[in-house]
């Protein structure tokens, strides 16, 4: 019987995981402690074990409290990584594949147009657009990490960290030690504060997010009539409905094999309250109180009859200049490094990309000194990409929930015009320079973080490794000895030629 909440999963995870174990192994294996066994911590464990290292994940939850029933969207740049790790079959059983974003007006329910992820784009990305629950994705990653022999410890609450000594103290009093500590304990975790060196200064983002689940099968039975038969064939399965409103927005998509809906409600305003994923779902009253008087009847019905609603705060976080602690032995990844707003498509994806890049870099580890170099290389490779994704997703949240006014009117009429012309709503108009916007979507999804890490190794890592094997002074930490800003590609050619 299936272990997932979605029916029809018949393949054992171990089959997929065997494939995921066949990656390049580092000549030198070291010990990692990953703090946090969420999506990103587990992904990091998979990536690093695949690269031949020993990994212990410490998670304060009991294995259930650190997962949730809410929905997640997995964009192609994320599924591509998971497929590469051998998890394609198991994901296809546990998740639903969607090829359609359907935009509608939140107040009237009027369809504003579709965005179909066409074959050409998906081929270019080498991934799929998938939807599933947090708990199901967590299980896929937990099973994969366990099968690869990562040690995963639940009820292991980290209360103190001594990065200089690679030491982590649990609330039980037990002390663990590793060569490198990976902080994957989320945006409110200890590691982010440690790297920042103080408490973080949080501001209101002016957005408020409710995570809602609603039981019942996917009601796409009336999809054909809603879109008046204008969709290409075979694209209407598992649509992600995006309702754009005036000062509010909502997203709906199927999870658990289509047995439940995940719903996200978004409102504009200055809200100081709000909790975190994993909090008790006590917010149904608050949600009802915020609904506009005119609302699509389905959306109103879901909000009034939701089984669970959790209010998740969207805060404006500080940008961390450094993700690497000055000990050179601790790095933050995922939400701990670059918190993306709840409701962002790229939230988990950026963390999984982080994990994949770490795995690629550490697959080249051959001398202890590189262990620190790779942390700085990781930061170099990831900071801009994650900042762009965070900005892009926040802009999207603001766009779909634009207040009543010229921007909102332009948004709705542009979509409708494209729909009437039989075009995708996210396609740009060449005249207005919007083609650029569409190409940005393509580049976000087509980005291959593992290729980027490989390129770094060929351009910079090999150079450094050669310098080390030529008898460079190894008494100093390598990140002091190597000035990234001074390095140029020319020096590679020179070295290669000499
Ligand atoms: C319970 C839960 C439910 C969620 N549900 C959804 C959802 O439905 N939809 C969605 O889009 N996103 C959800 N998220 C958020 C989503 O997982 C993240 O935004 C994103 O995937 C990146 O995750 P992360 O692993 O970096 O951080 P997080 O998901 O925040 O994971 C951090 C992990 O670190 C653990 N941790 C924190 N402090 C310590 C400590 N001191 N010692 C040991 N462990 C520690 C936490 O228990 C948690 O498991 C959920 C997160 C959680 C924790």
Image (cartoon, rainbow, N blue to C red):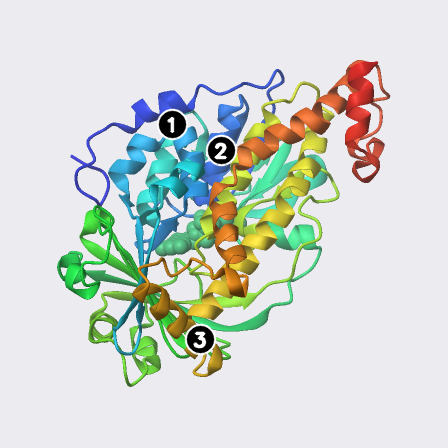
- The disc, 3 or 2, on the residue closer to the chain's N-terminal end is 2
- The disc, 2 or 1, on the residue closer to the chain's N-terminal end is 2
Q: In this figure, which residue is indicated by the disc labeled 1?
A: 86
Q: Is residue 172 visible?
A: yes
Image quadrant in which the C terminus is located: top right
Tag in front: 2 or 1? 1
Q: Residue furthest bottom?
A: 293
Checking the image for residue 45, the label placed there is: 2
| Circle 2: element type | helix
Q: In this figure, which residue is indicated by the disc labeled 3?
A: 410
| Circle 1: element type | loop
| Circle 3: element type | helix
Q: Is residue 385 above or below residue 490?
A: below
Q: Is residue 340 visible?
A: no
Q: Is residue 410 above or below residue 359?
A: below
Q: Is residue 185 above or below residue 103?
A: above
Estimate the spatial distance between the alpha carbons at disc 3 and disc 1, rounded to whole Å: 44 Å
Q: Which residue is at 36% across, 69% downward?
A: 417
Residue 3, quarter of picture? top left
């Amino acid at each position: 019987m299936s272990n997932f909440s979605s029916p029809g999963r018949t393949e054992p995870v171990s089959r997929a995981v065997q494939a995921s174990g066949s990656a390049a192994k580092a000549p030198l294996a070291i010990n990692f402690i990953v703090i946090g066994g969420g999506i990103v911590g587990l992904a990091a464990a998979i990536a690093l074990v695949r690269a031949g290292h020993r990994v212990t994940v410490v998670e304060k939850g009991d294995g259930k409290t650190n997962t949730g029933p809410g929905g997640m969207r997995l964009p192609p740049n994320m599924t591509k990584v998971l497929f590469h790790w051998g998890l394609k079959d198991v994901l296809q059983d546990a998740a639903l594949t969607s090829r359609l974003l359907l935009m509608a007006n939140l107040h009237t329910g009027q369809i504003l147009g579709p965005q179909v992820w066409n074959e050409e784009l998906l081929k270019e990305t080498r991934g799929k657009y998938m939807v599933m629950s947090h708990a199901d994705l967590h299980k896929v990653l937990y099973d994969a990490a366990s099968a690869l022999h990562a040690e995963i410890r639940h009820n292991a609450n980290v209360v103190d960290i001594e990065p200089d000594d690679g030491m982590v103290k649990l609330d039980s009093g037990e002390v663990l030690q590793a060569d490198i500590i990976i902080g994957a304990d989320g945006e409110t975790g200890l590691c982010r504060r440690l790297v920042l060196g103080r408490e973080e200064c949080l501001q209101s983002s002016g957005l408020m997010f409710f995570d809602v689940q609603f039981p019942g099968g996917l009601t796409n039975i009336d999809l054909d009539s809603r879109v008046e038969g204008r969709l290409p064939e075979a694209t209407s399965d598992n649509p992600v409905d995006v309702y754009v409103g005036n000062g509010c927005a909502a997203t709906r998509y199927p999870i658990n094999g289509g047995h439940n809906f995940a719903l996200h409600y978004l409102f504009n305003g200055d809200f100081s309250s709000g909790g975190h994923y994993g909090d008790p779902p006590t917010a149904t009253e608050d949600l009802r109180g915020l609904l506009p008087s005119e609302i699509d009847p389905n959306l109103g019905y879901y909000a009034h009859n939701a089984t669970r609603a959790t209010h998740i705060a969207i805060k404006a976080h500080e940008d961390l200049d450094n993700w690497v602690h000055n000990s050179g032995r601790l790095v933050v990844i995922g939400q701990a490094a670059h918190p993306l707003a709840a409701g962002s498509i790229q939230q988990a994806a950026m963390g999984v990309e982080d994990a994949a890049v770490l795995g690629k870099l550490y697959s080249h580890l051959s001398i202890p000194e590189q262990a620190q170099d790779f942390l700085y290389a990781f930061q170099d490779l990831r900071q801009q990409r994650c900042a762009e994704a965070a900005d892009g997703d926040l802009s999207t949240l603001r766009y779909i929930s634009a207040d009543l006014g010229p921007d909102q009117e332009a948004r709705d009429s542009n979509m409708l015009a494209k729909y009437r012309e039989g075009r995708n709503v996210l396609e740009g108009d060449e005249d207005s320079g919007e083609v650029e916007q569409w190409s940005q979507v393509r580049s976000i999804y087509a980005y291959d973080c593992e290729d980027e890490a490989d390129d770094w190794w060929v351009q910079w890592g090999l150079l450094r490794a050669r310098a080390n094997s030529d008898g460079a002074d190894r008494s100093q930490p390598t990140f002091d000895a190597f000035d990234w800003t001074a390095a140029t590609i020319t020096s590679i050619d020179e070295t290669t030629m000499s």
